[in-house]
């Protein structure tokens, strides 16, 4: 929570803008996703706004010749109930999870 009582999550994610665009609607399943390319809105099937998501492309990470995209992602859940926020986080984490060890 920030000082205004708003729930905001800040992430750095190894996704390009295009990858994020493809994954987000599938991750939210029956919830609607609108907006783009830098600001997205997620609403429940009944139209309640759950989240505003802002993305910003950061410089790529380099490991030798390997280049990885990086997005700064901020998720504002201020309008969501506790149950909606919890469900959003569950869907987001499951949808954007990448396998590995």
Image (cartoon, grey):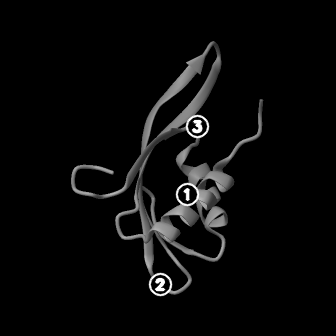
The residue under label 1 is: 89
N-terminal of the two: label 2 or label 3?
A: 3
Q: In this view, does 40 lie to the left or right of 26?
A: left
Residue nearest the observer in this picture, 45 or 23: 45
Image quarter hosting the C terminus: top right
Residue at 46 percent of width and 67 percent of height: 82
The residue under label 2 is: 47
Residue at 33 percent of width and 51 percent of height: 1
Task: Please tell me whether residue 71 is drawn above or below residue 6 in the rendered image.
Answer: above
Task: Please tell me whether residue 68 is drawn above or below residue 64 in the rendered image.
Answer: below
Could you tell me if the residues under marks 2 and 3 are in contact, i.e. CB atoms within 8 Å? no
Spot occupied by residue 46 in the image (x, y as percentages of width and height) = 52, 87
Which of pointers 1 and 3 indicates the residue nearer the eye?
A: 1
Outermost residue to the left: 4
Could you tell me if the residues under marks 1 and 2 are in contact, i.e. CB atoms within 8 Å? no
Distance from the alpha carbon under mark 2 to that under mark 3: 30 Å
Spot occupied by residue 40 in the image (x, y as percentages of width and height) = 44, 63
Task: Please tell me whether residue 37 is drawn above or below residue 81 in the rendered image.
Answer: above
Task: Please tell me whether residue 40 is drawn above or below residue 17 in the rendered image.
Answer: below
Circle 1 packing at 10 Å, graded few (<14), some (14-19), many (20+), is some
Circle 3 packing at 10 Å, graded few (<14), some (14-19), many (20+), is some
Residue at 67 percent of width and 55 percent of height: 95
Q: Give residue 14's mark.
A: 3
Q: How many numbered tags mark residues here?
A: 3
N-terminal of the two: label 1 or label 3?
A: 3
Distance from the alpha carbon under mark 1 to that under mark 3: 18 Å
SS for callout 1:
helix
SS for callout 2:
loop
N-terminal of the two: label 1 or label 2?
A: 2
């Amino acid at each position: 929570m920030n000082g205004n009582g708003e729930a905001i999550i800040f992430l750095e994610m190894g996704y390009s803008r295009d990858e994020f665009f493809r994954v987000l609607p599938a991750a939210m399943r029956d919830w609607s996703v609108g907006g783009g390319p830098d600001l997205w809105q997620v609403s429940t099937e009944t139209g309640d706004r759950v989240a505003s998501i802002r993305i910003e492309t950061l410089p790529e990470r380099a490991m030798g010749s390997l280049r990885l995209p990086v997005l700064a992602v901020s998720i504002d859940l201020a309008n969501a109930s506790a149950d909606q926020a919890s469900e959003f986080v569950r869907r987001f984490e499951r949808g954007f999870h990448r396998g590995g060890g």
